[in-house]
Structure formats: structure tokens, C-alpha cells
Image: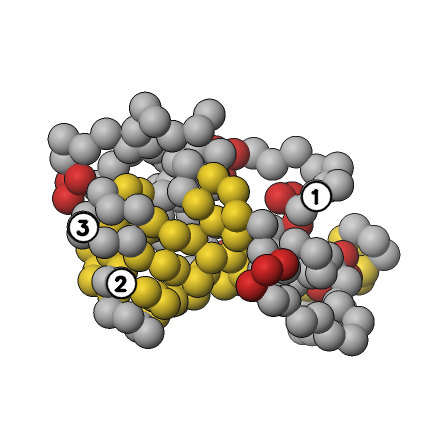
Amino acid sequence: MRFPPKAHRCPVGLFVLVVRCRQLHCVKRRTLLIGARCGERLLQQDMKTVQGYYVIKPEDLHWRPSNLMKIPNADYLERTGSENLGARLWRLPPKSANTLHKHIRSEEFYFVLEGTGRIRVGAETLTVPRYGGVLVGPDQLRQVFNDTDDEVLWLIVGAPEELEFLQGSKSKMDLSLIYPVDPKQLPNELAGVEWPTSGCDD
């Protein structure tokens, strides 16, 4: 006996089909899959693409210290209004670290422009040579740090952009999704180091 498809409505008028199955676990699995696809469609619908193109010159970049770890950084795309892609330079001073964090949906590509990059992903610590890179999935805890005596310059590109972090967003981000553990904890390689230092700007 065949069962007719059952229509389910998800937000913003999108319709999806759940094909009934004789086994309950099969229905659950298919429902989860369709729910994920529904979320992807909603995300794509909410994100606007950039029209034309933008040229970003070095003098256009505005360098500022990050909120938690005071790492100098410059957002390439802040003037473009891009909602699909994030791209930022991070200049890590010697014996410093950025936040330990993860993401909700963004994949991030970490690319070393100057120096020798150091990054921990999950339980692993990686050494990335100049012009090398690491692609990290959203569910992985990661932290860029610098346990060398020289500055290290990273270009970090992420997509899709976390809409909740965009300027003017009306959504309140649950920061525990980004920082499930103390974001300011330092890796073992920087044991005994004070960062941010007391001399960093508030």
C-alpha cells in the first residue's frame, strides 16, 4: 500500500514534502533532512548578493583592535555590504592569541600571508607555513595564536556570513553557540603568557 506524500509548511511560505515510511525512524531521518534543506533555502533567500564589483585598496582598510583579545584586524568587506562572504586581515603580535570559538554555519579559510601560522583546531595544533592555508568547518573549535617572536599576518575568509553579526541585524546572537567555552583561554603553547597584556587598549 502506498501512502500519499504529506505536505509540510515551513516559514516564509516554503513547502516541503515528507514521504511517509513504514518505519518511524525513517520518517524522523527524512524529516530532519528536509528541515535542513528548508533552512538552507531560507538562508539563501535572506542573503542579498552584491551588485557589480568593489575594489578595496590598502588605504581603505580601517585597522582596529578586536573586542575580546585586542588583536589588530581590518575588515575588507565592511564597506561593500556583503551578506554572503566575510574577509578580514588579522595581525597577531608575538606571544598573542585570538579567541577560541566556533561558528553556526560559516566555513572559514585561514591563509598565512606573513610569518609562520599557528592554529589549534579541536585537539590538534597545526603549523601553517607562509602562503599555506587551513579550511575549518563551522562545528570545530579553533584558535589562531602566535607563539613565535615575529608578527604573523592572516587573511581569514568565511562563508556564508553569520547574518546575526552584520551591522543593523535585529537578531540577538546566542553567544554560547560561538563561545561554548571560555573564549579567552590560551593554548598550552602560551602557558605563563599574559594576553591581552595590561598595555592593550580597552
Q: Which of marks 3 and 1 is nearer the N terminus?
A: 3
* SS state under label 1: loop
- The residue carrying pointer 2 sits among few (fewer than 14), some (14 to 19) or many (20 or more) residues within 10 Å by Cα, namely some
Mark 1 and mark 2: Cα distance apart in space: 32 Å
Indicate whether 162 appears above or below 178.
below
Percent x, y of residue 64: 52, 42
Q: Going from the N terminus, do you reach mark 3 or mark 2 first? A: 2
9 to the left or right of 95: right
Residues at badges 1 and 2 in contact (C-beta under 8 Å)?
no
Judge depth for marks 3 and 1 and give the one in front. 3
Crowd band around label 3 with a 10 angstrom C-alpha radius: few (<14), some (14–19), many (20+): few
Amino acid beneath label 1: Gln
Task: Tell me the tag on residue 167.
Answer: 1
Q: Is mark 3 on a helix, strand or loop?
A: loop
Q: In this view, does 192 lie above or below 74?
A: above
Q: Residue at x 14, y 35 (%)?
A: 191
Pick whichever, 116 or 86, lies toward us.
Answer: 116
Q: Residue at x 34, y 27 (%)?
A: 199
How many numbered markers are drawn? 3
Q: What mark, if any, has residue 149 been given in the picture?
A: 3
Q: What's the amino acid at mark 2? A: Gly
Q: Which quarter of the figure is the N terminus placed in?
A: bottom right
Mark 1 or mark 2, earlier in chain: 2
Above or below for 51 versus 40: below
Measuring 79% from the left and 51% from the top, which residue is drawn there?
11
Q: Residues within 10 Å of mark 1 (few under 14, many from 20)?
A: few
Measuring from the top left, give residue 34's x and y in whole percent: 64, 62
Q: How far apart are marks 3 and 2 (CA)?
A: 10 Å
The CA span between labels 3 and 1 is 35 Å
Instruction: Say which quarter of the image contains residue 19.
Output: bottom right
Q: Does 20 sit left or right of 146 as displayed?
A: right
Disc 2: which residue: 115
